[in-house]
Amino acid sequence: MTTTIKIDGMHCASCKALIEDVAGETPGVKSCVVDIGKGQGVIEHDERFVLSDLVKEIEGLGDYKVTVV
C-alpha cells in the first residue's frame, strides 16, 4: 500500500533526511521518499501502519504540518 502526505515546513536536505529516518522507524513502513520540491512524502507500508502515529512523530520534530494528499 502507498500513502502520499503533504509536508509543509521543509526547507533543506536535513529536513528530508530527518523525516525519512523517523518514517523508517515507524511500524509498518517499508519505505519513505520525501521530495522537498513538491513538499510531499510517499510512504510504502503494510497493514500495521497507522498514519496518525507518523503524523504525530513528524509534527513533533519541529515546525512541520502534515496533511494527506
Image (cartoon, rainbow, N blue to C red):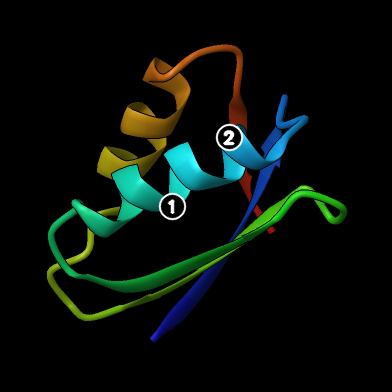
Decide if residue 62 is on the left or right side of residue 22: right
Give, as a three-letter code, the residue at label 1: Glu
Residue at position x 12%, y 69% in the image: 48
Say which quarter of the image contains residue 66: top right
Q: Residues within 10 Å of mark 2 (few under 14, many from 20)?
A: few
Q: x, y (%) of residue 53?
A: 25, 40
Residue at position x 42%, y 32% in the image: 58
Residue at position x 50%, y 70% in the image: 3
Q: Quadrant of the N terminus?
A: bottom left
Q: In this rendering, is residue 61 above or below 19?
A: above
Say which quarter of the image contains residue 4: bottom right
Q: x, y (%) of residue 52?
A: 33, 41
Q: Quadrant of the C terminus?
A: bottom right
Decide if residue 37 is on the left or right side of residue 10: right
Say which quarter of the image contains residue 38: bottom right
Which residue is denoted by mark 2 in the rendering? 14
Sequence-first disc among 1 and 2:
2
Residue at position x 77%, y 30% in the image: 11
Q: In this rendering, is residue 11 above or below 41?
A: above
Which residue is denoted by mark 1 in the rendering? 20
Q: x, y (%) of residue 21?
A: 34, 48
Q: Nearer the viewer, residue 65 or 23?
A: 23
Q: CA distance from mark 1 to mark 2?
A: 10 Å
Give, as a three-letter code, the residue at label 2: Ser
Q: Residue furthest front?
A: 13
Residue 11's disc number: none
Q: x, y (%) of residue 8?
A: 73, 31
Q: Residues within 10 Å of mark 1 (few under 14, many from 20)?
A: some
Q: Is disc 1 placed on a helix, strand or loop?
A: helix
Q: Residue furthest bottom?
A: 1
